[in-house]
Image (cartoon, rainbow, N blue to C red):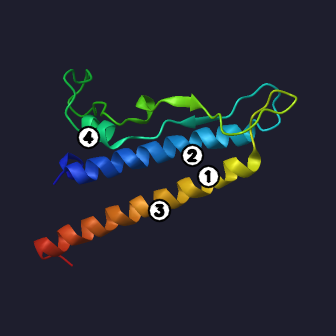
Amino acid sequence: MDFGKLPLFAMMSQRLAWLGKRQQVLAHNIANADTPGFRAQDVKELKFKEIMRGNRPSKIPMATTHVTHMGGRPGDSKSFKIVEDRSAEVSLSGNSVALEDQVLKVTMTAMDHQLTVNLYRKHIAMIKTALGRP
């Protein structure tokens, strides 16, 4: 059974992809905390309507050259919009990274990731129970 075709699992997969991309962007911000002129970035928050729109099959599937190749899916980490984070003030060097804010965002993102993974596991366990498997 392909759980990715179930809407709930597709939304959780998209959420996990978004959280992964956000961690990557936040880590890039922290790495450039002392770079003059660097502006902090963040990944645009997913809205419920956007998530629901992303679960529909795309009209033009990605071309594959072999039967075993996987096509791209909506919600792929390349489809998230990276925006400038304007919540921190800019220092004299032109850098807008506030380490405290970035570490807080990293922690919140990790907690959201753990919550989503736990929900995913619980739903898998519920389906297994419904099927009569341990």
Tell me if mark 1 has few (under 14), some (14-19) or many (20+) residues whose alpha carbon lies within 10 angstroms of its own.
many
3D distance between C-alphas at marks 1 and 4: 26 Å
Residue on which the image places disc 4: 52
Three-letter code for the amino acid on which mark 2 is drawn: Gln
Residue on which the image places disc 2: 23
Location of residue 75 by image quarter: top left
> Where residue 24 sits in the image (x, y, percent)?
58, 41
Q: Tag 2 or tag 4, which sits nearer the N-term?
A: 2
Residue on which the image places disc 1: 106
Q: Tag 3 or tag 1, which sits nearer the N-term?
A: 1
Q: Tag 1 or tag 2, which sits nearer the N-term?
A: 2
Three-letter code for the amino acid on which mark 3 is drawn: Gln
Tell me if mark 2 has few (under 14), some (14-19) or many (20+) residues whose alpha carbon lies within 10 angstroms of its own.
many
Residue on which the image places disc 3: 114
Q: Image point 75% across, 34% down: which residue?
A: 96
Mark 3 element type: helix
